[in-house]
Amino acid sequence: MKSPFLRRFRILISALVFICFFLVFVDFRYIIPADYFNYLLYLQFIPSAIKFYDLQTMIAGGFIIILVLTLITGRTYCSFLCPLGIGQDIFSRIGGRIRRKFRRYGFKKPFTVVRYSILAATLIVTFIWGIYLVTLLDPYSIFGRFITLFVKPAVIVLNNLLSGLLGKFDIYALSHTPVKGYPLLVYSIPAAFFLLIGGLSLTRGRLYCNMICPVGTFLGLISRISIFRIKFDESACTRCGRCSVGCKSSCIDFLQYHVDVTRCVDCFNCINICPDKAISYGLVSLKKKEHQTDEDKRKFIAGSLMFLFGLSQTARGQEARTPVPTKASTVKENKTTPVCPPGGGSIAGFNKDCTACSLCITACPNNVLQPAWLQYGVAGMMQPVMDYHRSFCTYNCTVCTEICPTYALRPLELEAKKLTQIGKSNFIKDNCIVKTEKTACGACSEACPTKAVYMIPYEGNLLIPEVNNEICIGCGHCEFACPTTPYKAIFVDGNAVHQVARKPETKEPEVKTPVEFPF
């Protein structure tokens, strides 16, 4: 096929895919249903492979479709379905607009040692240590982290500016939404990858895909035996070199009439630019003997990869009602274990499957999920962790368990989630303002949805909290509500393995909070 329609078709499909992923990650109104996420993520290679490894069912077999697609069409995944690849195409086009020479790529020899070393290192580290390198280098996860940490806040700021502007004309179609940031250190990894990938795509096209990305390298190996590929009509070619200059993968050696199919991402720019119609996309010719491949190596790589595999407004109201301490708390919270989200089952199992794509972080309606820095150790950097100083896990919410593309967070029915104990509350009496300032409080008890935190007599008319960890689920309502700083008087320590809490009784507690509460 030599029709320019191929390139237009690629642009149309990739634009739709990019827009869909963009909307999913910047949806700060939470209007996109969770089922939509699952359909969209089905064909993302690494998340699908990890999910398949856990479930052993074709329901999670989207990556197999990608492998079959690659065997038939070559690396079309990289141009049609990978949001990071599509983003690189956008950047390379911007680079071409800035300086024309950026669009003149030309044939370059492949970085064979680098690309296969990174793929081998990723597989070896994954086999021995876990999916840390996969977490860092998975293209879908890189895209998700960047959009969540940088683009989504920018969209919210723009929304707030428009909201204020329209409000002056008595138009209230948009409402103000607070911008909530993340710990400063977690921005470093997405920022570093943005500078690396953005710089390479602006000046060198798809160099990142063909030098660093392990998914691109692996699919490139499979594309060696693809049925459809870019090919030359040597009788028609005048060796003008336009195809090579316009190839963003730098994989066309027009002097030798050769296309390096391991790097070609089937963007079809060469077909569109060729004035002689000497380049086409179609069935591979069997006249020439294909380069012999190492089947044992392919089987090893394929087998190894298979192995890898109350809301914010309420919170603000809580803050407004809570008494303000006059003294700083002095006893540090002894948190021994981080709190991983419900549905994780255990921290070890969660860390093994999570690619840190940030989809659950951006979808969490209460912003309690934050990118981890060293809470899980080096191997768990950028994976989501509960931060109860910033917010709490809404009792009636299961969004994160519904949208996880790798099954690192297993789907939970709401009633099951309400009994899943992800951590236990710990009370530090020496930090509590009831003891330190003789001030009536009870914010933690008031906020607790299961009443695992309740008030008991202390001194005079004062009541002080007590914790029943049999019914505590570790949701963090109490920790977030506690007004003491810098250390909380009550905090949640995570369970390394999630447990089942006892169902809370509905009878009234023996000691009731006074009707005239101090706040």
Image: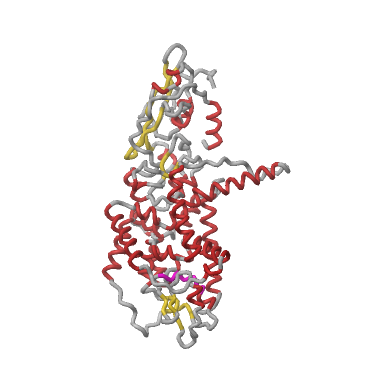
For image coordinates 46% across by 51% down, the residue present is 191
Q: Is residue 256 above or below residue 118?
A: below
Residue 499 in view:
no
Q: Give the range drawn in magenta.
A: 263-269
Tag count: 0
Along the viewing direction, whichever of 57 and 176 lies nearer the viewer: 176
Residue 66 at what x, y percent from top left? 41, 65
Residue 193 at what x, y percent from top left? 44, 55
- Say whether residue 264 is magenta: yes
For image coordinates 50% across by 42% down, the residue present is 181
Q: Is residue 78 above or below residue 454?
A: below
Q: Is residue 169 above or below residue 478?
A: below
Question: In the image as oriented, which residue stretches furthest toward the right?
Answer: 169
Magenta part mainly helix, strand or loop?
loop
Along the viewing direction, whichever of 401 and 91 lies nearer the viewer: 91
Residue 94 in view:
yes
Residue 197 at what x, y percent from top left? 46, 59
Q: Is residue 18 above or below residue 154?
A: below
- Say whether residue 110 is magenta: no
Q: Is 306 left, or right, of 30 in this rendering?
A: left
Of the 4 image quadrants, the one containing the C terminus is top right
Question: In the image as oriented, which residue stretches furthest toward the top?
Answer: 460
